[in-house]
Image: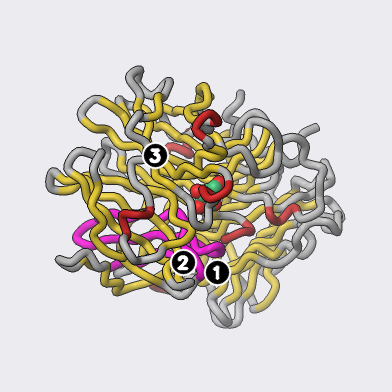
């Protein structure tokens, strides 16, 4: 029996997957490319895998999109993006080779085009499209992960990197996607490197998202006329980091939604090797909106189509525990409650009957934290047990909404349609599929509603 492989998240049939790449809405379908090693379940031999979907929920696997061009000394096709130039889709990605073309100092930016609606891709004969010479005397290391968009009839690109040991994003401009001009260092931060930048307009602001080898951060701000980003507000896009969410990428669809998908890594497996011949999952797609200078992150509506058996509890006071009838390893739960002073409560999922193995999603009033307590997530001592923690302010009337998606080894917790924590867990017992809500501190939890659904597999 499968105990770990998610059933309603995207992942390839087997082998290693990491960053989502080149996500784009094209001719009525969502395309997802991804970093992929066709030869094993460890990172290496980076190719681009490819899948598409009509609804962001059910995905169809397609042939690999990019292979390293060994004859040109290319070893990896690192992350990048897809854009449509007229009718022709173009991929921009970072090409890594041998020796001097290593990721620290030798990366180049390459392109590939498709003439058959993205089914097959041909590398452009003009490659490399950009080399690091474009920066003149400015030395950039770990230069990678192009993100391209069109604004006022001009193309722009941002790339991640490291300048004087500080993570940075660089910005470039082009008229034809072929010849590029370096504009500026768009923004710099304190981390050693910034990977996979996304930079886009949302409402009347610009948003910069960066992956700094840890929790993914976002900045909201404005752009100066000399192409310097001026951050005004900052936040954590997902508290998961290496425990659950990294290197996201985004698209805009025909409804105008900014939709983001991130890689749910397996770092929490540590020395646990029971999962089989696959590694890496893509997160559920989420929408991004700015409200009160904070990025609000919500799962896409389309996921509701997977809801199956349902149980609902309304307007009750939780004084000890509630055990719903529904159980399983693929679930969605929503609780809306008024959280009084001193309250702490827990929603246990993937729990064994005796509670020896369980993953507890907790809310603590004292420090307004919500977190995935993984201390008992697995009776195996091989995987990571540290909590994955975030913070969220209560809404008016001390109201809290937690929307939780459980899918075998993935947990995603959305709090107040605003903040999110993604985490990975590896419960080893087949019977670890029970659910229980418990009041841990305080007199009572005034629950307005509690909903729980079994979630259909996307393979059915
Ligand atoms: N993964 C890719 C890089 C990127 C990193 C390599 C982020 O392009 O910077 O697989 O996870």
Q: Are marks 2 and 1 in contact (CB under 8 Å)?
A: yes
Q: Tell me the quarter of the image containing the N terminus.
A: top right
Residues at badges 1 and 3 in contact (C-beta under 8 Å)? no
Q: Residue at x 31, y 29 (%)?
A: 89
In terms of depth relative to the viewer, which is nearer, 261 or 151? Answer: 151
- Whether residue 60 is situated above or below residue 436 in the rendered picture: above
Describe the element under mark 1 as helix, strand or loop: strand
Q: N-terminal of the two: label 2 or label 1?
A: 2
Q: Residues within 10 Å of mark 3 (few under 14, many from 20)?
A: many
- The residue singled out by tag 3 in the image is 110
- Identified at 44% across, 73% down, the residue is 164
Residue bounds of the magenta highlight: 192-221
Magenta-span inclusion, residue 387: no
Q: Is mark 3 within 8 Å of ligand 1?
A: no
Find residue 236 and name its label: 2
Q: Position of residue 299 (x, y in %)?
A: 45, 48
Label ID, residue 390: 1
Regarding residue 8, the answer to whether it shows in the image is no
- Left or right: 181 with respect to 352? left
């Amino acid at each position: 029996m499968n105990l770990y492989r998610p059933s309603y998240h995207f992942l390839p049939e087997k082998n290693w997957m990491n960053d989502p790449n080149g996500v784009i809405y094209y001719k009525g379908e969502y395309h997802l490319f991804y970093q992929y090693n066709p030869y094993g379940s460890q990172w290496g031999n980076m190719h681009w895998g490819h899948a598409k979907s009509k609804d962001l929920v059910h995905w169809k696997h397609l042939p690999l999109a990019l292979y390293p061009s060994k004859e040109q000394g290319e070893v990896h096709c690192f992350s990048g993006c897809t854009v449509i130039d007229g009718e022709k889709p173009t991929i921009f990605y970072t090409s890594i080779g041998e020796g001097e073309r290593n990721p620290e100092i030798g990366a180049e930016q390459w392109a590939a085009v498709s003439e058959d609606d993205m089914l097959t891709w041909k590398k452009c004969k003009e490659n490399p499209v950009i080399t690091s010479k474009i920066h003149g005397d400015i030395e950039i290391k770990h230069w990678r992960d192009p993100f391209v968009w069109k604004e006022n009839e001009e193309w722009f690109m941002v790339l991640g990197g490291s300048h004087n040991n500080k993570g940075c994003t660089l910005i470039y401009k082009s008229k034809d996607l072929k010849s590029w001009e370096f504009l500026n260092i768009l923004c710099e931060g304190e981390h050693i490197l910034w990977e996979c930048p996304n930079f886009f307009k949302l409402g009347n602001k610009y948003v910069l998202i960066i992956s700094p080898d840890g929790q993914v951060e976002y900045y909201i701000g404005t752009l100066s006329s000399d192409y310097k980003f001026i951050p005004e507000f900052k936040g954590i896009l997902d508290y998961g980091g290496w425990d659950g969410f990294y290197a996201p990428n985004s698209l805009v669809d025909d409804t105008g939604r900014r939709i983001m998908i991130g890689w749910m890594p397996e770092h929490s497996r540590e020395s646990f090797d029971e999962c089989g011949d696959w590694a890496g999952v893509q997160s559920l797609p989420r929408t991004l909106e700015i409200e009160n200078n904070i990025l609000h992150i919500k799962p896409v509506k389309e996921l509701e189509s997977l809801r199956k058996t349902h149980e609902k509890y309304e307007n009750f006071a939780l004084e000890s525990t509630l055990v719903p009838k529904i159980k399983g390893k693929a679930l969605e739960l929503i609780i809306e409650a008024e959280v009084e002073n001193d309250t702490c409560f827990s929603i246990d999922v993937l729990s064994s009957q005796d509670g020896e193995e369980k993953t507890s999603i907790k809310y603590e009033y004292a420090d307004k934290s919500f977190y995935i307590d993984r201390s008992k997530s697995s009776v195996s001592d091989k995987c990571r047990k540290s909590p994955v923690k975030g913070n969220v302010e209560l809404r008016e009337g001390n109201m809290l909404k937690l929307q939780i998606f459980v899918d075998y080894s993935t947990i995603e917790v959305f709090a107040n349609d605003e903040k999110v924590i993604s985490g990975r867990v590896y419960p080893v017992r087949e019977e670890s599929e029970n659910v229980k809500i418990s009041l841990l501190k305080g007199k009572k939890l005034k629950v307005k509603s509690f909903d729980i659904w079994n979630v259909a597999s996307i393979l059915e």
